[in-house]
Amino acid sequence: MIESEKEHKNKRVLSGMRPTGRLHIGHLVGALQNWVKLQNQYECFHFIADWHMLTTDYMDTSELEDNRFQMILDWLACGLDPNRSTLFVQSSIKEHAELHLLLSMITPLGWLERVPSYKEMRENLADKDLNTYGFLGYPLLQSADILMYKADFVPVGEDQVPHVELTREIARRFNFTYGRNRTEAVFPEPQALLTPVPRLPGTDGRKMSKSFGNDIKLSDDPAIVEKKILPMVTDPARKRRQDPGNPDICPVFDYHKAFSTEATQGWAAHGCRTAEIGCIDCKHGLLKHLLPVLEPIAASRRELEAHPEAVREVLDAGNKTARHVAQATMDEVRKAMRL
Ligand code: TRP
Ligand code: SF4
């Protein structure tokens, strides 16, 4: 067994995901495949970050409930196993709100204002009014999520690393302010576990996102997947079949890297550079590897969809386990703060 696959069942992993509804292959490659692996090595907690969704999407909550349900279906269909991972809903564990409030007392405004996503998202999501208290505090809510479970590792994408960094600072400040002495830290400092995969672009080459309509959903039928892949954006240098291209700048090749065998990747890269294959051949080569990955996920999803009450039971059980841990942490926190 190689070092990185050893079991560390005494170490805890925690991560959350905003309930955006049906997930896409970017979520699969960027997070879920990794979460599924981690459950063999660590004690894992994963939650549906529905309060986080409100920090940007507070104006329209009509789809929140269905989005939560669609997301847990995808999680389970991808192989997250409720017997090995605790799967729960953030808004079901009210302790997160209490810890967020208490941590807010010791958090300097400057720490929140300088989180890079704060400025960036306010500019990028200009159609939403994000001049809110909740939006400024959202990385701190994330700190509360992480510290509540005393997580050792937080598997996240690069964009989230500053939030884990903030969490470490908050943990230090709390321990320093309320810990009885240095050896009795209430909160351990979590570490980000960077997911070792490149981001998958959308079918138009931009960031993959539901709002751009350029995503391939885990629940798409094979016919739909084909309909989305075949017209995909490629290297624009390949205007005609005989023009050679560069796979390194082609979104289709990013998909090959995520789903195809080395042999197929070699075939595609060579065929592209020499114009021995056309883009349609290349895309059919990709589909041969992509569809068999999606097929069992779709089958499992259909099965789960037919038993919504069993899916709800999974979350009820996960909530119960999570609440138990959260209550114990809050007892410690209140005691440390003399509340
Ligand atoms: N902020 C994360 C995102 O937007 C989701 C999230 C909320 C999270 N709480 C978390 C991730 C705690 C890891 C740990 O993707
Ligand atoms: Fe992209 Fe493949 Fe066409 Fe090359 S052959 S441009 S890698 S789709």
Image: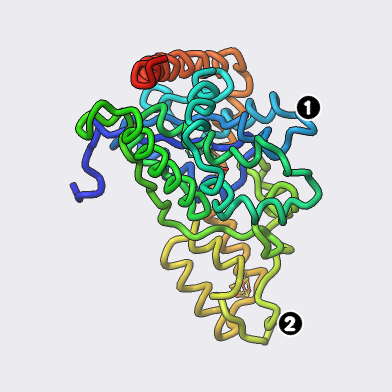
Along the horizontal axis of the image, is 275 left or right of 129? left
Rendered-image quarter of ligand 2: bottom right
Q: Image quadrant for the C terminus?
A: top left
Element under label 2?
A: loop
Q: Is residue 158 above or below residue 187?
A: below
At 42% across and 24% down in the image, what residue appears?
86
Tally the numbered discs.
2
Cα–Cα span, label 2 and label 1: 44 Å
Residue hosting label 2: 239
Q: Amino acid at mark 2?
A: Lys
Residue 248: x and y in percent read: 54, 75
x and y, in percent, of residue 150 in the image: 35, 30
Chain-order first, disc 2 or disc 1: 1
| Residue at the spot of label 1 | 62
Q: Nearer the viewer, residue 164 or 287?
A: 164
- Residue at the image position 56 percent from the left and 68 percent from the top: 253
Name which residue lies at 51% across and 76% down. Answer: 269
Q: Amino acid at mark 1?
A: Ser
Q: Residues within 10 Å of mark 2 (few under 14, many from 20)?
A: few
Residue at (74%, 48%) from the top-left corner? 211
Determine whether the residue tagged by mark 1 lies in a helix, strand or loop.
loop
Measuring from the top left, give residue 69's x and y in whole percent: 63, 25
Please indicate, yes or no, whether residue 39 appears anywhere in the rendered image.
no
User: With 13 as the anchor, is 115 left or right in this view?
Assistant: right
Q: Are marks 2 and 1 in contact (CB under 8 Å)?
A: no
**Viewer-side residue, 225 vs 321:** 321
